[in-house]
Image (tube, rainbow, N blue to C red):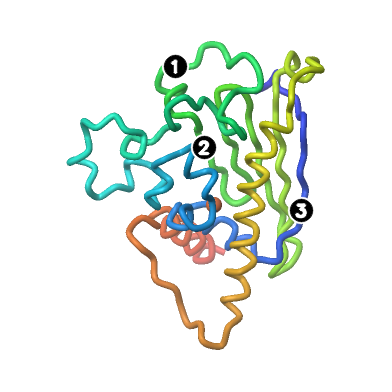
Amino acid sequence: MAELQVGHTLRTTLACNWKIFWENYSECYHCPGVHPELCKIVPIYGRSISGPYSDPAYQSHRDDPDPKFQGGLRKGAMTWSMDGQPIGPTFPNLTEEERKLGQRFATIWPTMYAVGHVDYMRLVSMRPLGPEQTELTVEWLFTPEVLADNGADLERVTRFAQLVVEQDGAACELNQAGLRSRAHTQGVLMPQEHGVFAFHEWVRRGLASA
Ligand SMILES: [Fe+2]
């Protein structure tokens, strides 16, 4: 990462509380309805789960190599881009497992997460501007070689995650509006939203020790 450089930045302000952004990030229950393009690249997302660890029936699919059961990218895709193809040479020294996975998330509550792909990285950070306003910054990091290559079509890569971020942003704003509804009392978590529960517990622990 130390050698990578920012090649594209997206900064936007969402009309939602910062915790709504994290709740959205923590589950893929919304994926089929919100991210049709992403579900094509990462087939397991199309089953409303973010990985095999969220699949209650995983034992019965254990030996099925289909990425919709094992996670990872669709056949032929290598990275998150409009056509699934990388922007340039892939990073050296990646394990076979990392290549197969297609994406690896590192989460640092409450301010940012990083996603590593085989050819680039993405950093997403947020800053609360108010109770119902969150500034979001997305940075795409590439190798100096890719950035020096005038023929590299960065947009083919950046447009994909930008689309996903915009879809999530719209869902978060809708969620915030829903919380303001007089009909709303509380939500119900589905089993595949265990990540949301973990986030709630983290917030509750923070409030208890405040
Ligand atoms: Fe999403």
- Say what amino acid the circle numbered 1 marks: Thr
- Identify the secondary structure beneath mark 2: strand
Label 2 near label 3: C-beta < 8 Å? no
Give the residue at mark 3: 12
Which quadrant does the N terminus fall into?
Answer: top right
- Say what amino acid the circle numbered 3 marks: Thr
- Say what amino acid the circle numbered 2 marks: Phe
Q: Nearer the viewer, residue 142 or 108?
A: 142
Query: What distance separates the C-alpha of mark 3 from that of mark 1?
Result: 34 Å
| Residue 199 pos. (x, y %) | 48, 56
Give the residue at mark 1: 95
Distance from mark 1 CB to nearest ligand 1 atom below 8 Å: no
- Identify the secondary structure beneath mark 3: strand
The answer to whether residue 105 is left or right of residue 86 is: left
* Marks 3, 2: nearer the viewer: 3
- Residue 105's label in the rendered image is 2
Which quadrant does the C terminus fall into?
Answer: bottom right
Please name the residue shown 58% across and 63% down the image: 20
The 10 Å Cα crowd at callout 1, few under 14, some 14 to 19, many 20 or more, is few
| Residue 39 pos. (x, y %) | 47, 44
- Identify the secondary structure beneath mark 1: loop
The 10 Å Cα crowd at callout 2, few under 14, some 14 to 19, many 20 or more, is few
